[in-house]
Amino acid sequence: MSVAETLETTATLAQRMAALGQAARAAGHTLALATAAAKTQAITAAAAAIRAHAAEIQTANARDVAAAEQRDTKAAFIDRLRLDESRIEAMAQGLDAIAALPDPVGEITRAWTAANGLAIERVRVPIGVVGIIYESRPNVTADAGALCLKAGNAAILRGGSESAQSTAAILECLHAGLKQAGLPAACIQTLPTTDRAAVGIMLTMAEYIDVIVPRGGKSLIARVQQESRVPVFAHLEGLCHTYVDGAADIDMARAIVVNAKMRRTAVCGATETLLIDRRAIASHLPPIIADLRAAGCEIRGDAAVQAIDAGVVPATANDWDTEYLDAIISIKVVDGVDGAIDHIDRHGSDHTDAIVTADEAAASRFLQRVDSAIVLHNASTQYADGGEFGMGAEIGIATGRLHARGPVGAAELTTYKYVVRGHGETRP
């Protein structure tokens, strides 16, 4: 391609992206005024369409999976990409749950009368247009589209090229729901191309997009944070920890650790590092290692762990900073809850961390001092999920500290304005 042709293609893509942004902005204005009933109808109808067209979605997904397998894609990536009957039904159920949520738009979160006599209310309103960039997981198309719709936002979605056919099939169902409710199809759009250049343009579209939500690997997040001229809800890697305290019930610890690591290894809430109290290594560690090994997990550990089990692979310094997204776990022995907190402070990603203990004082210290978006006591890190929080679904787990943190559901996709009512007051 010549330089002139390249420039022409870039210009054409920029024009197409601008048109998409304009349509999203106009749809957002319409959606901000839509009734709660209309939004609920659109989401419920989309769920019904997903069920009615499950076979077509699965066929499209099979083509995406086959193409990924031909590229010798990692098994963990394939697992995130694959949609079977149960996952498609779970996607529809997620939409039903979102539809059933209270409408956040218009909620009065605070009301008071100031000393000057003005009656002031803080009211939830839509953000406007939300751009979502995600990799490999086609179910995000449904979750993100429906959550933005519930919160009165237009959505511009950019799924990974590897899930393009799955995304297109799901988008048709979302558009069917919008049509049934009398809402414009531009309320939920995808980028007009899989060209990576479109992402670069998207990150500069501050005129049309109010916030970007990236959901993917470390390289994607880094690119978005470096290049975006639009505010970002960061979803960093899920370098999650489970700490087994010396006062942990052994049966509970065994069940939680195996679930936290092995239920689904490719999700961001999967535990990647197990921290174990030095007081518990003789009693708790051998059966936990046996359970993990029986479940097919590779185990890497420090010298103290290797001394307990000679089959443990020596851990390197990099292991403490690695999100495996695979059937691999690193195990480190620490000195009590403070040792666990210190390790998480140095190596965690502020995503999700858990403590297993019967000692309430130790649990309170952990929950207070670990500054992650989600901290748990006596529960698996795999509960780091908006659906499990009763939020219907989530766009992602925000690990930043501004506006939204933790699962980003419908309420987190709103902002607010102040509505002030007076009685003819003038300021002296």
Image (cartoon, rainbow, N blue to C red):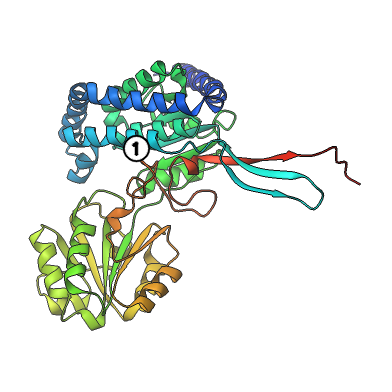
Q: Quadrant of the N terminus?
A: top left
- Residue 348 versus residue 198 in the image, above or below: below
Q: Position of residue 20 (x, y in %)?
A: 49, 21
Q: Residue at x 73, y 40 (%)?
A: 420
Q: Position of residue 39 (x, y in %)?
A: 45, 27
Please state which of residues 11 and 43 is positioned toward the viewer in this rendering: 43
Provide the secondary structure element on which disc 1 rests: helix
38 displayed left or right of 423:
left
| View extreme (left): residue | 294
In depth, the one of 417 and 144 nearer the eye is 417
Amino acid type, mark 1: Ala
Q: Residue at x 28, y 35 (%)?
A: 93
Circle 1 residues within 10 Å: few <14, some 14–19, many ≥20: some
Residue that lies at the very extreme toward the right in this rendered image: 428
Q: Circle 1 is placed at which residue position? A: 97
Residue 421: image location, x then y, percent: 75, 38
Q: Give the total of numbered labels.
A: 1
Horizontal arrangement in the rendering, residue 7 relative to residue 242 (left or right): right
Residue 323 appearing in the image: no
> Whole-percent x and y of residue 96?
33, 33
Residue located farthest toward the bottom when viewing the structure as drawn: 279
Residue 68 visible in the shown view: yes
Rendered image quadrant of residue 289: bottom left
Residue in view at x 27 percent, y 31 percent: 163
Q: Is residue 276 above or below residue 230?
A: below
Q: Is residue 133 above or below residue 250?
A: above
Seen at 28% across and 54% down, the residue is: 382
Q: Is residue 18 above or below residue 385?
A: above
